Amino acid sequence: MKRAYGERAQALKNRLTVLDAVEKLADVPKGPPDWLEQLTGNRDEQFSVVLNKNWRLIFEIDQNPIPRLPDGGIDLNSVTAICVIEVVDYHKR
């Protein structure tokens, strides 16, 4: 992992450990150091957690259908499976 992700390797390992340990997405901390965030625009069904600086671990919900709230938002209390998509500095795109 260190060879592939360099200085981000330990943070990536830590975030994956957190994601593996929680029972539902709502249990992932919304503040430091993880900073769970739902993305917007063409990534509005994806989420990220901070690795360092601008680098993020990006994932999406791996449930079909995606659990929804009455207002159409994603029900984080019902999300129990995710799929990691990428590790990226998406601010550079």
Image (cartoon, rainbow, N blue to C red):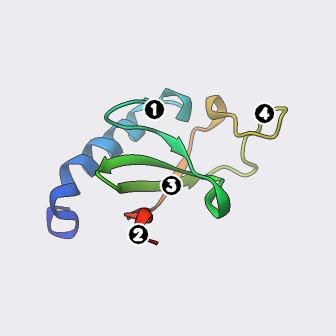
Please name which of the two marks, 2 or 1, marks the residue nearer to the observer. 2
Name the residue nearer the viewer: 36 or 83. 36
* Mark 3 vs 1, N-terminal side: 1
Residue 69 badge? 4
> Disc 2 residue type?
Lys
Q: Residue at x 41, y 37 (%)?
A: 35
> Disc 3 residue type?
Phe
* Mark 4 vs 1, N-terminal side: 1
Q: Residue at x 33, y 43 (%)?
A: 15
> How far is mark 4 from mark 1, CA to CA?
18 Å
Residue 92 badge? 2
- Within 10 angstroms of label 4, few (less than 14), some, or many (20 or more) residues? few
- Within 10 angstroms of label 3, few (less than 14), some, or many (20 or more) residues? many
Q: Is residue 51 above or below residue 20?
A: below
The residue indicated by pointer 3 is 59
* Mark 3 vs 2, N-terminal side: 3
The residue indicated by pointer 1 is 28
> Residue 47, position in %: x, y?
53, 49
> Disc 1 residue type?
Val
In which quadrant will I find the N terminus? bottom left
Q: Report the residue that reaches farthest toward the bottom.
A: 93
Q: Residue at x 50, y 54 (%)?
A: 59
- Residues at discs 2 and 1 in contact (Cβ within 8 Å): no
> How far is mark 3 from mark 1, CA to CA?
13 Å
> How far is mark 4 from mark 2, CA to CA?
32 Å
Q: Is residue 83 left or right of residue 74?
A: left
* Mark 2 vs 1, N-terminal side: 1
> How far is mark 4 from mark 3, CA to CA?
20 Å
